[in-house]
Amino acid sequence: MFAATKADHARGLTTVCVKRRGRASEPDRSSQQVLRCGQRVYPCRVARVSVLHHLALGTRDVARLAGFYIDVLELREVSRHLHADGSLRSVWLDLGGSLLMIESTTEPPRMVVGIGAGLFLIAVSVSAERRRAFEERLEHAGSVIETRSEFTSYARDPDGNRIALSAYPLLGIGGA
C-alpha cells in the first residue's frame, strides 16, 4: 500500500493504491480527483466519510432523556427498541440526517467540565432568530445556560451531558 502525501491528505485524499504482484494497481478512474502512487498520478475515486451516522448516549432513564431531546430541542423520534421483557432499551432521534441514539445502561452519568477526553459536547444547529426561544425552553426544563458565546449557548441535559445551541453559520460545509 502507498501513503498519500501531506498535500493529498489536505485535499481529502486517502491511501487507496494497492500493490499487487510487485506493482501498483491503478485505481478506479471514474472521478475527477487524483491520487499519487509513488511518482505516478492517477485520477481516482476516493472513499471518505461523508456524514455522521449516529451518536449514542447511555442513560439509566431512556424515556426521561429522550423526552428532553424531543420536547425541549424538538428532535423527532425515529424508532423505539425494547428489551426481551418489554422494557424500553433505546429511542433513536433524528439529528437532521444523523441519529442520536438514547441507550439504556446501568452505568452512572459522568460529568465533563470544559473540554474532556472523548465526546464532551453535543451541539445542535439553531437559527439566530430562534436561539433565545430555545434558551428559554432549556431554562423552563431546568437546564441552566452555563455560558454563551457570540453564536452558541451551552447547557446540560438531565443526565449532565453538555449540550449547545449553535447559530454559527456553516457556509460551504455539507453543501450549505
Image (tube, rainbow, N blue to C red):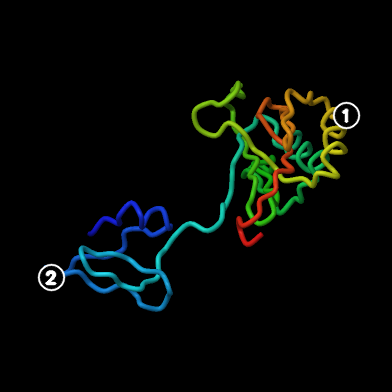
Q: Quadrant of residue 4?
A: bottom left
- Quarter in which the N terminus is drawn: bottom left
SS of the residue under disc 2: loop
Above-or-below relation of 102 to 142: below
Q: Residue at x 66, y 29 (%)?
A: 162
Q: Could you tell me which quadrant the C terminus lies in?
A: bottom right
Query: Looking at the image, which is closer to me, 144 or 150?
Result: 150
- Depth check: give the residue in front, 11 or 57: 11
Q: Secondary structure at mark 1?
A: helix
- Residue 91, image x, y percentages: 69, 45
The residue identified by callout 2 is: 21
Residue 118's x, y, as percent? 50, 32
Pointer 1 residue: 140
Label 2 amino acid? Arg
- Does residue 157 appear in this view? no
Front-lying residue, 23 or 71: 23
Residue that sits furthest to the left in the current view: 22
Q: Amino acid at mark 1?
A: His
Q: Position of residue 45 (x, y in %)?
A: 40, 70
Q: Residue at x 82, y 25 (%)?
A: 142
**In the image: residue 68, left or right of residue 33:** right
The answer for how far apart the CA atoms under marks 2 and 1 are is: 66 Å
Sort mark 2 into few (<14), some (14-19) or many (20+) by Cα contacts within 10 Å.
few
